[in-house]
Each structure stands twice: as C-alpha cells, then as structure tokens.
C-alpha cells in the first residue's frame, strides 16, 4: 500500500498519482478536496475554518460516494414535452453518522440529498483500550431496503467503524458504504477483514497510527477540532 509521500515544498503534484488505493477503497484525489484537506490538517486552522472546510469537502466527497446509487425514473413535463427523467430515490437512502464527528460530514450531504433518512450511532473511543464505547443508536426503519452511507471523518484503528457496521447489520442493513476523510492502512485492513462487502471512500490514506492510535500525519482529533473541545 502506498501512502502520501513527503514532498519538498512547492513540488508539483499530479493528484491522480499521489495514492494507490487498495481494492475496495476509492481515494477522492480531486484538487479541491486535496487543497481543503491540507488546510484542515494545519495545526493553526481555527475551529470555525475547520468546520467550514469539512462541510465543503463533504459536498465533494458526496459526489463520489453517491456515484453508484440506484436510479429510477419519473414522468415529468418539460416546457416542451413529457419525458421519463432519471432521479435518485432519496427515501431509499439512509445516512448514518457516527457521533460526534460524523455530523460534520453528514450535514453537507443532507443539503444535497434532503430526502435521505438519517440515523445516528453514538460511539466514543476509549483512549486506553482504543475500543469503541456505545452510548446511542437510532436508525431509520427498514434498513434492509435502503442503501446506507456511514459517515465518520476518521478511520484510524477501524474499531469504531467496524462496530458501527456490526450494529447496522444487526438492524438489517445489507447495502452499506463507508465515507471518511482520512484513513489509516490499519483501519482499512480492519474494516476489510470485518466487512469486506463495505466499500470505502476517503480523501486520503495516511502513513500509520501512532502509539495513541492517532493517524500520522493526520489532522489530530477531528471531533475536538470541529467542536473546539479540549
Ligand atoms: O478508527 P478508530 O480507532 O475507532 O477511531 C476513529 C474514531 O475516533 C473518533 O471519534 P472519537 O472517539 O474521538 O469520538 P468523537 O467523535 O465524539 O470525538 C473518530 O471520529 C472515529 O469515530
Ligand atoms: O487521528 C485520529 C484518530 C482517531 N480519531 C481522531 O479524531 N483522530
Ligand atoms: Mg474525538
């Protein structure tokens, strides 16, 4: 697996060649996404800017994660004539946010697909064990009939996302994809072992995890940076 290389400042970058993604993982290497992600990574970026950037990136990532959504048609009348026009069945979609940080990705996607149903999985990562602790679970009915897009900016050990997908499958979900901003190779491996059926979309695959389970180089604690806690 290739991670984003350290390049001397000012080196021209061909976005498409930055990252080689493993099968089942899509890296959204669009220049706008990469530019905004760089701003988010910077230590000095304010809480307000971090939140705004995450919302903007979520719109761009939504484009990729929804690329293969099932479509239907509906009969409409243009000013010229009737036609069967393509449409997404928003009600067939469930957006699932892993609290807290997932909400930063979800809000922008909801602007694009306002008819989507929304669910929440409340998990926090125990800082000692790096195991997820569940505190909330509320999802739409009939998940088995919906495409579920699970959103969380960070895929680190993969313990939180794997646990969230476990819960969704127990609730009936069958068609699940996972959208994040940053992924560590360890988290991708964990997800692909536990849930090989779940496609992953991310803006970048970083180098590794540090001794505290943080993504390196990463962007720090997404929830804290988004909400100004800590
Ligand atoms: O892949 P993992 O090793 O499980 O780590 C990733 C999880 O850690 C962060 O949440 P956190 O526990 O900080 O909760 P928060 O969103 O409330 O800040 C992040 O938003 C993921 O949910
Ligand atoms: O780097 C990391 C790892 C887990 N959670 C975060 O918010 N950041
Ligand atoms: Mg956090």
Image (cartoon, rainbow, N blue to C red):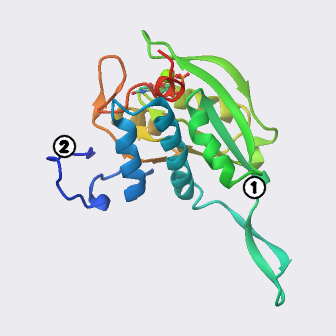
Q: Residue tagged by mark 1? A: 90
Q: Which quarter of the picture shows residue 211?
A: top left
Q: Is residue 122 left or right of residue 217?
A: right
What residue is at 51 percent from the left and 34 percent from the top? 48
Between 182 and 141, the residue placed more toward the observer is: 182
Residue 22 image position (x, y, % from top left):
36, 49
Q: Residue furthest left?
A: 8
Residue 215 image position (x, y, % from top left):
35, 29
Above or below, 106 relative to 14:
above
Q: How many marks?
A: 2
Q: Residue furthest top?
A: 128
Mark 1 nearby-residue class (10 Å; few <14, some 14–19, many ≥20): some
Badge 2 marks a residue whose secondary structure is loop
Q: Quadrant of ligand 2?
A: top left
Mark 2 nearby-residue class (10 Å; few <14, some 14–19, many ≥20): few
Q: Residue tagged by mark 2? A: 6
What residue is at 57 percent from the left and 61 percent from the top? 67
């Amino acid at each position: 697996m290739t991670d984003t290389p350290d390049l001397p400042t000012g080196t021209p970058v061909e976005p498409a060649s930055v990252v080689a993604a493993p099968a089942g993982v899509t890296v959204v290497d669009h220049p706008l996404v990469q530019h905004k992600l760089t701003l988010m990574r910077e230590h000095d970026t304010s809480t307000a800017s971090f939140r705004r950037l995450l919302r903007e990136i979520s719109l761009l990532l939504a484009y990729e994660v929804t690329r293969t959504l099932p479509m239907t048609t509906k009969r409409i009348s243009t000013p010229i004539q009737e036609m069967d026009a393509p449409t997404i069945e928003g009600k067939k979609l469930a957006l699932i946010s892993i609290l807290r940080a997932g909400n930063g990705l979800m809000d922008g996607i909801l602007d694009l697909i306002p008819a989507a149903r929304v669910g929440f999985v409340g998990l926090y990562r125990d800082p000692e064990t790096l195991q997820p602790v569940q505190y909330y679970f509320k999802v739409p009915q009939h998940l088995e009939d919906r495409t579920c897009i699970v959103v969380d900016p960070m895929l680190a050990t993969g313990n939180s996302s794997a646990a969230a997908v476990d819960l969704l499958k127990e609730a009936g979900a069958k068609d699940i994809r996972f959208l994040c901003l940053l992924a560590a190779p360890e988290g991708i491996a964990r997800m692909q072992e536990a849930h090989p059926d779940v496609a992953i979309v991310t803006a970048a695959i970083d180098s590794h995890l540090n001794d505290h389970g943080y993504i390196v180089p990463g962007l720090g604690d997404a929830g804290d940076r988004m909400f100004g806690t800590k």
